[in-house]
Structure formats: C-alpha cells, structure tokens
Amino acid sequence: MKNVAVIGAGTMGNGIAHTFAQFGYKVSLIDVQQASLDKGMATIAKNLDRQVAKELITESQKADTLANITTFTDIATGVVGVELVVEAATENVDLKLQIFKNLSEATPENVILATNTSSISITKIAAVTNRPDKVIGMHFMNPVPVMKLVEIIRGYSTSDQVTKTIMDLSKNLAKIPVEVNDYPGFVANRILMPMINEAIYTLYEGVAGVEEIDQVMKLGMAHPMGPLQLADFIGLDVCLAILHVLHDGFGNPKYAPCPLLVNMVTAGKKGVKTGEGFYSWGHGTKDLIVADNFKK
C-alpha cells in the first residue's frame, strides 16, 4: 500500500497527510475548498520547517515530503488509484455519512475506507457503504506528526484482515496502534471528555479559576496539559459534539455537556481555532492568558 487519499485539509487532515507523505506514501489531499488546501499545505510546510530546525529531518526530506502530496478539490478525481482513504472531515454525522456514500461509489470495492472520527459509530458509517467489512476507524491524536497513539476502531463488520492491515500500516508510520471496539467515544474520548466536562463544571460552579483547575491536574495528576487548555486545543465545538454523541449513545445524564460549554460554543469562543476559549490565543501560545470572561 503506497497510495493514500486524505479527505479534509484541516488540523487533523493536514497532519495525517504530512505523516503519510513523510514516510514515503503518495498522498492525495482532498478538500472542497481550495483555500483550505492552500492553508493546509502551508501548515505542513511550516511544521516541516520546525522538524528541520530541530534536526529531526533534512531539507531534502522536507522537499520529498511536500512532493509526495497532491491536492484535489474533487473526491472522484482525488481517489483514483488509491488503496486507502482516510476521512478527516468535520465531526458531523451527516457530513461523514455523505462522504462515505460518495467514496463507496467512487472507489473499487478493494479500497479500505478509514475514518478519523473521534466518537461517531464506525458501524453506522460502514452501513452506508458497499463494503462494511473494509470500513474502520483510524483515530489519530493531535498533533498527528508528533503523537504516537492511533486508536484503531473495529466496526461490527470490520474484517480481521482489514484490522491487521491498518494495525501494521500504523506501525509503518512509527505510531503505536491500539485496537478497540465500536462504542460511543471509543476509549480515548469516553474517558477524556467526561473529565474535560467536569473541569468545565468545576469552573462553572465557581470552585476554582481556569489556571487553578489546570494547575491541579498538571501538578497533582502529572498531566502535561490541564483539561481546560486541552479543550481549547481540541476545539470546544468538537468537545461539545463528542459529548452529545456520548449523551445520546448511552442516555446517561453524566455525559450531558455543561451549560457553560454550550454557551461558549454558541458565542463562537471555540478555543485556539477562534483565538479565544478558556484562554486567549490572540498573541500566540507562548503568550497564553486567561480569557477576559474568566479573569478574577
């Protein structure tokens, strides 16, 4: 397997494309917006420059990585000749189902269809295709070129052979794959999102401030990043979407999103991507300060 298509040029999509290309795969990066593709390629180039500066790769390897990526604005054109498609579009059920219906029609039945979804049912996605045995979850962590974990999620019909192929492929990318089954939130977000939600409730109820909550978890629990800062990195809209999936999937009120999170997303305060969430990111991550709404 040497030809891969990645759908979505956002944070996760460009990171996945970067990683495959760096390991010698020919990558078709697909997005409906040319501006998104241009921004994604600029991000990849910038991240490669960081790797060069840290002497992790050479200038020649950077050039080879960029040469391995070709951009497309049309799915049918972009998936010609590929053996694997990794979908990394917005965490929206209807959008993903439509993409997989299109992929089912646009690719031969031997092509494996993977999704980078962080919470949506693989079985539900697979059901709209003509090859549910070849549909699998391939949940990378952000930032993709750096983080080692890939959560490999088997749908109800995913075959053993496809699972083994994707596990082995992940290892070829210098990742550590972990196989899990298809239940709401899988493992990573089933554990992580209730913790983030509880941290938001702790702020909402006035138990402590943003920095204090994050400091407790960093210094007391050895977390490299506090839950509120992590939520900003993930995107508060993404956190909200995943909590809705957990709440709907399990029907348990413990997964109900905190009203503060709902209000922040409604107000457009989505974290790093919008410049403000629990922290202000307007001056870059090195100058991170608590957002005005949460200052004492």
Image (cartoon, rainbow, N blue to C red):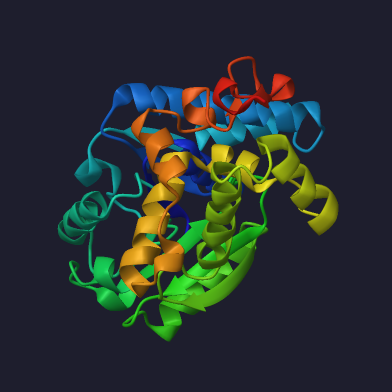
Residue at 75 percent of width and 51 percent of height: 217
Quadrant placement of the C terminus = top right
**Foreground residue, 80 or 125?**
125
Splitting the image into 4 quarters, where does residue 248 fall?
A: bottom left
Q: As displayed, is residue 267 above or below residue 24? A: above
Q: Is residue 113 visible?
A: no
Residue at 34 percent of width and 21 percent of height: 35
Q: Is residue 295 left or right of residue 96?
A: right
**Foreground residue, 228 or 97?**
228
Splitting the image into 4 quarters, where does residue 183 fall?
A: bottom left
Residue at 64 percent of width and 24 percent of height: 295
On the image, the x and y values in percent for residue 208 come to 68, 42
Q: Is residue 240 visible?
A: yes
On the image, the x and y values in percent for residue 258 come to 45, 50
**How many labels were placed on the picture?**
0
Q: As displayed, is residue 221 above or below residue 66? A: below
Residue at 59 percent of width and 24 percent of height: 291
Q: Is residue 192 left or right of residue 55?
A: left
